[in-house]
Image (spheres, helix red, strand yellow):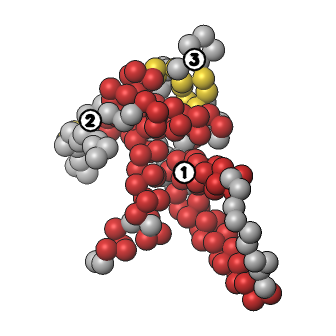
Amino acid sequence: MNAIDDFLLGDSALHARLCVMTEVLGQFVSCAPRSLTLDQLKRQTRMPIRDLLKLCATLCREQVLRRHPEQPQCWALACETSKLTLEDAFRCVVSEQLECARAAKRRPLAAQPLADTVHREVDMLVMQATMGINQSVFQHLRQFSLDRLKVTTAGTFPSRSASYGAPRGWPPTRLSFS
């Protein structure tokens, strides 16, 4: 296995952001339907408050979280845990990146030469490929519900029966967000 196989789409930064977003969402899933305050989230994730505020703002903008009506720095999931998937986390990461790109475009830039025909065609081809890849990625990520995190953070899985009728539990498993 080479180094590029270790990351989603071969992008270590995208992979890291997806893991962070999923970790934060995992905290909300594990305490659903209750709300989480910024202080609780900071203690559980050990992330800086500034980063958590940005993440929660993105999650609210994408309608994954909702703000508590009476507490400004308190949020809860906006849907049932069974409806939340890795696709939602990935969508929020992509939204976050687009927002950063929009902010960068608003800054004044030095005069840029107009794109020629070949450059525009390359851009169009890459954009079409990117859209196809993103649709495929979303389709695959949609299959992984984050409510799995709620079960595994409790420390045990539901018991199942052995094939010959004797009850047998699965070994207890703890989820690690590292």
Find residue 32 and report its horizontal and vertical position in percent.
47, 26
Find disc 2 in the rendering and name its residue.
Answer: 156
Q: Residues within 10 Å of mark 2 (few under 14, many from 20)?
A: some
Residue furthest to the front = 110
Find disc 1 in the rendering and name its residue: 93
In this orientation, which residue lies closer to the viewer: 168 or 18? 18
Q: In this view, does 148 lie above or below 109?
A: above
Q: Nearer the viewer, residue 24 or 33?
A: 24
Under mark 3, the amino acid is: Pro
- Name the N-terminal-most of marks 1 and 3: 3
Answer with left or right where residue 66 lies relative to residue 158.
right
User: At 64% across and 41% down in the image, what residue appears?
Assistant: 62
Residue 72 - label: 3
Whole-Å distance between the Cαs marked 1 and 3?
Answer: 23 Å
Mark 2 → mark 1, Cα distance in angstroms:
30 Å
- Is residue 117 visible in the rendered structure shown here? yes
Residue at position x 47%, y 69% in the image = 9
User: Which residue: 55% across, 30% down?
Assistant: 77
Of the image marks 2 and 1, the number of the one nearer the N terminus: 1
Q: Pinpoint residue 114: horizontal percent, then vertical percent.
A: 79, 78
How many numbered tags mark residues here?
3
